[in-house]
């Protein structure tokens, strides 16, 4: 299947806003995010069901899919940005029209729970999507400058970005050396696990896997990484990029536990592929935008990541 890249975003273009996962508690964040996008010269269309709440979901499955399909069908909409993650996109995967997405390739942005949606789109439509900032999380208040600069450069420019200039305040760690090329696949670890063995799992052969998570104790991260080992994912990938594992510490300090660092070191040694950790992506303000499916080069000897092609055309 041919790899698809969405057209680049230009000032004056229309950006669609959808909530394919959980509702946002403070709907004013949507308004603030819209004002931010408008201040940059874009027009904004908010999905009909974006502020609905059905338990822990932002509307029914049918309503959330309807908003997504509506934005894809609307020829004026050039990019789709998710409000937030939470939980909900795995419930939509069997309802999505992947042929429609392939016929109308557009920029799609989100992370966390949006991981399942983006990996399914890569598997079924071969469209590059973006693990990047979301409207109600990253664009509703003061935007981190590193996050902002990298995101807008990737979605507006058809030039090859080259080596990522990482923030100086983060010390990237090498857990296994080596230099490899591959296509970026990954996202939130728990959501990757949620589609392992399903029709929506991508082929990880020759890829560079990137992972992050939030609120998972070390034993739970350990369990998920072991599942990837047993599913032969680590024997298929060429390298691993670990981002921020936010609040992934033991909850009961009176009980013995491995540290997250110990879990990652053991995983890297077992995988025997170039492995970097402490990269700036995940549930943090300062985040890289990682295009799913993009060809990159990682050098774990010196801790660098290079984008070998543009993510838009």
Image: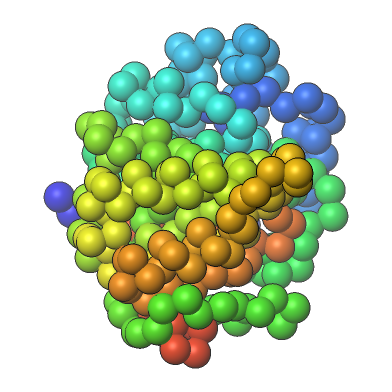
Q: Is residue 52 left or right of residue 219?
A: right
Q: Position of residue 228 (x, y in %)?
A: 33, 49
Q: Position of residue 107 (x, y in %)?
A: 46, 49
Q: Which residue is at a point 25% across and 35% down the rendered structure image?
A: 197
Where 67 falls versus 304 (above or below)? Answer: above
- 137 vs 41, nearest the viewer: 137
Q: Is residue 59 visible?
A: yes
Where 257 falls versus 276 (above or below)? Answer: above
Q: Position of residue 254 (x, y in %)?
A: 75, 44
- Count of numbered badges drawn on the protein: 0
Q: Position of residue 16 (x, y in %)?
A: 57, 36
- 121 vs 271, nearest the viewer: 271
Q: Which residue is at a point 43% across and 44% down the rendered structure image?
A: 224
- 269 vs 200, nearest the viewer: 269
Q: Residue furthest left?
A: 1
Q: Which residue is at a point 25% across and 46% down the rendered structure image?
A: 231
Q: Is residue 196 left or right of residue 83?
A: left
């Amino acid at each position: 299947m041919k790899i698809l890249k969405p057209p680049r975003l230009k000032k004056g273009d229309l950006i669609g806003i959808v909530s394919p996962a959980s509702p946002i508690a403070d709907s004013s964040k949507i308004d603030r995010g819209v004002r931010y996008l408008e201040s940059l010269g874009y027009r904004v269309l908010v999905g009909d069901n974006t502020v609905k709440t059905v338990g822990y979901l932002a509307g029914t499955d049918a309503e959330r899919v309807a908003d997504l399909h509506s934005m894809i069908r609307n020829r004026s909409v050039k990019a789709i940005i998710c409000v937030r993650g939470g939980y909900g996109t795995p419930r939509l995967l069997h309802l999505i029209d992947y042929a429609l997405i392939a016929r109308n390739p557009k920029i799609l942005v989100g992370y966390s729970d949006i991981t399942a949606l983006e990996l399914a789109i890569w598997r079924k439509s071969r469209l590059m999507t973006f693990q990047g900032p979301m409207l109600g999380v990253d664009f509703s208040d003061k935007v981190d400058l590193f996050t902002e600069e990298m995101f807008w450069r990737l979605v507006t420019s058809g030039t090859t970005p080259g080596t990522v200039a990482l923030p100086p305040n983060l010390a990237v760690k090498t857990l296994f050396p080596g230099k490899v090329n591959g296509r970026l696949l990954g996202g939130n670890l728990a959501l990757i696990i949620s589609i392992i063995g399903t029709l929506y799992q991508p082929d990880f052969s020759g890829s560079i896997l990137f992972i992050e998570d939030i609120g998972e104790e070390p034993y739970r991260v350990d369990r998920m990484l072991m599942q990837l080992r047993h599913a032969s994912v680590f024997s298929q990938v060429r390298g691993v990029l670990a981002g921020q594992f936010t609040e992934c510490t033991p909850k009961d300090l009176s009980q013995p536990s491995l540290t997250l660092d110990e879990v990652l070191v053991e995983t890297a040694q077992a995988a025997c592929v170039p492995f970097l950790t402490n990269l700036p992506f995940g549930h943090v303000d300062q985040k890289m935008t990682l295009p799913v499916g993009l060809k990159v080069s990682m050098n774990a000897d010196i801790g660098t990541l290079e984008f070998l092609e543009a993510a838009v055309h």
